[in-house]
């Protein structure tokens, strides 16, 4: 019998709960993990939108000696640079010791999360209530966004260029906003609908006020709201045309469970990977051999299009600038650098949820608490639209993780033919870079309150650091 156990120990892929490994000397200790999670929770509570994430990330980067790339005439190994694209996406790099022609090591996450945006003409009054019309952003289950506290974040830009920053609903003394839903007593017809149609997109209207400006005035509640907005922000209704206002859950990111092993919070897809990659970059003690490049992209949730999305050429421009300032640029060098580069596409992974385990195939599902989650490929049905990492590259990443005692797991996003998804991986893979999806497993993904494990959070941080350090 003993022999069988020995043989199993030697031959099986042990899929161990990470927390069982934290007592061993070599792996991350529980106290270390909990301490790191505190920093993450703080970061999440300061930054709920892509603009806020970029602002917080810039602060962290500058505190750690990073400078805007244009402040450098020339670059040399050890220089720390960043570039911000329209306040919504950001690229950072530490110049490595090795010739850049041999390739760079990239980690890329995204700062945008599913939410409700305001329509360009949002304000209206109905039956003595004032409302904002919304248009949802990204893949949401609409019913989850009613009857929860919501805050408004974003900017209003006036024609003279003045930009007014809005952040209301997060402070204890702020009012919050909400979208109402029907009482069960009168919801017979609604309850018979499919979950998908229970709440229609056009019914996601934010309730924002109910006091009229005065008696016997048409649209008096709307007028009163505009009067308040005018006094508070100096805007009129037409200024809302040039605004980007986002509704996000006004709920704090918090430690979760009696054992405090998890984190619950909005927007962990993909801010958990932003935080882990960013802190990993900040904590690189020595100048890396290969140039370490960190991407915080935008618009991933709606297909990465537009000039702040990963599909834009702004990232190529940033890389070209590095080549220019290193004094090595020449025709086709950028393409060559890309073809020699490696990347971890840092995006969250769907964790197996025991309540809904029928959508997952247990042998190929990611589990909360088993470490950083790799996806060799994503896509749907017959791997349609997948960026499939080459076996040679998967082996390289395995070696880095195994040599640094980083707990990892490799899974798929649900059962074959059940669904699918994608990340920014294919966009970088199309440039010739070796890319694999590598992030943190999440429960309730894309909901107003997503759940992650502190163990996986910390292993992602350690894993990203090991990748850049190799
Ligand atoms: Mn994501
Ligand atoms: Mn997502």
Image: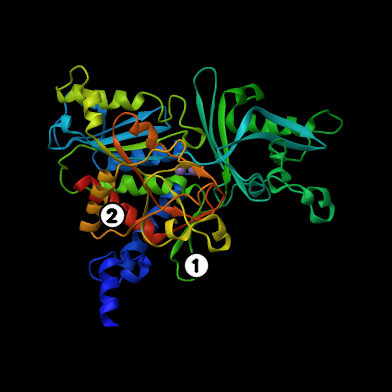
Relative to 59, residue 39 above or below? below
Residue at position x 43%, y 32% from top?
A: 88
Q: For the residue labelled by badge 2, is the local secondary structure a helix, a strand or a loop?
A: helix
Q: Can residue 310 be seen in this view?
A: yes
Q: Earlier in the sequence, mark 2 or mark 1?
A: 1
- Does mark 1 have its CB less than 8 Å from ligand 1? no
Note whether 57 is above or below 326 in the view shown: below
Q: So how many labels did they put on this image?
A: 2
Looking at the image, residue 79 lies above or below residue 179: above
Q: Is residue 283 visible?
A: no
Q: Which of 418/73 is in front?
A: 418
Front one among 386 and 449: 386
Q: Which residue is drawn at 61% across and 46% down?
A: 150
Q: In this view, does 222 lie to the left or right of 287?
A: right
Q: As rendered, which of 418 and 141 lies closer to the eye?
A: 418
**Which residue corresponds to the image point at 58% horizontal and 45% vertical from the top-left?**
169
The residue drawn where x is 79% and y is 48% is 190
Q: In the image, which disc is placed on residue 462?
A: 2
Residue 123 falls in image quadrant: top right
Mark 1: secondary structure: loop
Residue underneath mark 1:
257
Q: How far across and how far down the image is residue 130, in percent? A: 74, 36
Quarter location, residue 248: top right
């Amino acid at each position: 019998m003993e022999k069988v156990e020995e043989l199993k120990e030697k031959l099986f892929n042990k899929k161990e709960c990470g927390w069982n490994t934290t007592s061993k000397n070599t792996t991350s200790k529980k106290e270390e993990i909990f301490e790191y999670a505190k920093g993450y929770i703080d970061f999440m509570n300061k930054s709920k939108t892509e603009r806020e994430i970029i602002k917080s990330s810039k602060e962290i980067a500058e505190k750690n000696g990073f400078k805007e790339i244009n402040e450098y005439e020339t670059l040399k190994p050890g220089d720390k640079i960043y570039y911000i694209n329209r306040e919504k996406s950001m690229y950072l790099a530490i110049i490595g010791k090795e010739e850049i022609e041999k390739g760079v090591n990239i980690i890329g996450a995204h700062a945008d999360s599913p939410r409700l945006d305001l329509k360009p003409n949002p304000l209206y009054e109905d039956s003595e209530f004032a409302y904002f019309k919304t248009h949802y952003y990204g893949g949401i289950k609409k019913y989850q966004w009613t009857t929860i506290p919501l805050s408004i974040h974003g900017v209003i830009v006036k024609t003279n260029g003045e930009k007014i920053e809005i952040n209301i609903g997060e402070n204890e003394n702020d009012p919050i906003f909400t979208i109402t839903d029907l009482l069960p007593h009168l919801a017979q017809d609604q309850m018979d609908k499919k979950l998908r149609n229970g709440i229609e997109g056009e019914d996601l209207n934010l309730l924002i006020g109910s006091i009229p400006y005065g008696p016997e005035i048409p649209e008096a509640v709307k007028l009163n709201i505009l009067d308040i907005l005018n006094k508070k922000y100096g805007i009129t209704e037409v200024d809302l045309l040039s605004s980007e206002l986002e509704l996000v859950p006004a709920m704090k990111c918090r430690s979760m469970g009696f054992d405090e092993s998890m984190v619950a919070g909005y927007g962990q897809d993909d801010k958990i990977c932003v935080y882990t990659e960013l802190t990993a970059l900040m904590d690189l003690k020595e100048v890396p051999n290969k140039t370490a490049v960190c991407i915080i992209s935008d618009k991933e949730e709606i297909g990465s299009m537009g000039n702040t999305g990963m599909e834009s050429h702004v990232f190529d421009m940033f890389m070209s600038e590095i080549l220019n300032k290193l004094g090595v640029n020449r025709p086709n060098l950028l393409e060559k650098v890309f073809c020699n580069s490696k990347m971890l596409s840092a995006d969250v992974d769907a964790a197996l949820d025991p309540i809904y385990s029928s959508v997952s195939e247990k042998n190929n599902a990611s589990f909360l608490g088993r470490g950083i989650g790799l996806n060799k490929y994503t896509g749907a049905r017959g791997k349609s639209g997948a960026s499939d990492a080459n076996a040679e590259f998967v082996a390289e990443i395995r070696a880095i993780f195994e040599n640094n005692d980083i707990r990892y797991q490799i899974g798929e996003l649900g059962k074959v033919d059940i669904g699918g998804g994608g990340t920014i991986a294919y966009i970088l893979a199309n440039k010739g870079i070796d890319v694999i999806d590598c992030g943190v497993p999440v429960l309730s993904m894309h909901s107003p309150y997503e759940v992650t494990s502190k163990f996986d959070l910390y292993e992602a941080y350690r894993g990203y650091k090991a990748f850049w350090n190799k």
